[in-house]
Image: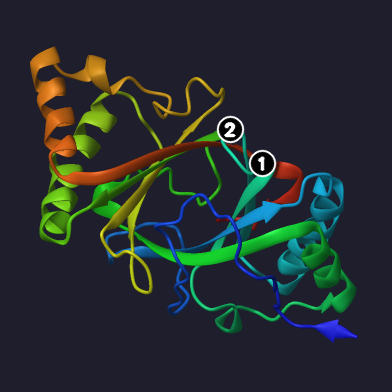
Amino acid sequence: MKSLNRFSAPCARISLAVLLFVTAPATLWAQDDEGPAQINIRLVDVKPGSNAEWQAAIAEVAAASEAAGWLFYHVYQRLRGPNLPTYSIITPGGATNDLPPRDIDQSVFDRLGHSQNGNALMTVLFYPELGISTGSVAPSGEFMSVRVRTVSPSNRQAYFDWHANELTPAAREGGVTDLRSGRVAVGGNTNTFVRFYYGDTPQSAPAGGGNIGQSMNQRDFQRMIANEASLIVADEMYLYRFREDLSFTAAGQ
């Protein structure tokens, strides 16, 4: 028996609790001047001792996605924190019914359901004015740092402006070459921003391969950090490793 596009399991202990289930029309992650891009991020909590079973099943899902013509399927494994093993799966944005249908046997989903405690799906808008683009959806480093910032409703626009006018220019001057940053759109906390930095080592990922602090004088740097702190009500940071063996990026993307 075949199943199309299903990836079912009850929600469980997902660390990014502020980011909830969201769906919207499909677009690409590649940022341009036409407006925000949109991606789906699925957070998966795998049962201890079931890591190999889950990885084998998700590899089949990735292969079926590639065969169906999906543009990318990126799997990241979280390196630190509670409830390990935990994964993030990044795919083109929107409801899966809007994407090319995949031919996946039901047994694959049964194996996924057996090997995981649960998963949660969200869609995030990524804005070109907040990011530094390489022109490709492929990750630019093996390691990815994810920073989550939640602001009060009254500070949402102020945080967006701080990011666009202070952080992003400083990151660019500091040598960051790949910064992807956005906000939860609907269905969850719409005042939550997420930003991704990439690096070739775990140590370089939090800084995105650059050094923002050395791109400006110390007083301006401390003022920029203080400006962010005055706007946020909660913050989290996670470190992931890209699982190239479980992922793909279509040619030209």
- Which residue sits at x=25%, y=59%? 191
Question: 48 left or right of 179?
Answer: right
Residue 189 occupies quadrant: bottom left
Which dot marks residue 80?
Answer: 2
Question: Compared with residue 99, is residue 60 higher up or lower down, i.e. above or below?
Answer: above
Residue 247 position within the rendered picture, expressed as x and y whole percent measured from the top left: 70, 51
Q: Secondary structure at mark 1?
A: loop
Residue 63 in which image quadrant: bottom right
Distance between the alpha carbons at the discs numbered 1 and 2: 8 Å
Lateral position of residue 14 relative to residue 207, left or right: right
**Residue 158 image position (x, y, % from top left):** 11, 51
Q: Label 1 sits on what residue type?
A: Leu
Q: Quadrant of the N terminus?
A: bottom right
Residue 154, above or below 210:
below
Q: Residues within 10 Å of mark 1 (few under 14, many from 20)?
A: some
Marks 1 and 2 in Cβ contact (< 8 Å): yes
Where does the image place residue 128, in percent across and percent down from the top left?
Answer: 29, 54
**Neighbour class for label 2 at 10 Å: few (<14), some, many (≥20)?**
few
Residue located at (27% from left, 32% from top): 172
Counting labels gives 2
Residue 182 percent across, percent down from the top left: 33, 55
Report whether 125 appears left or right of 219: right
Quadrant for the C terminus in the image? bottom right
Residue at (80% x, 58% y) in the render: 115
Judged left or right of residue 234, residue 121 is: right
Query: Looking at the rendered structure, which numbered label has been put on residue 125?
Result: none
Instruction: Name the element at disc 2.
Output: loop
Residue picked out by circle 1: 84
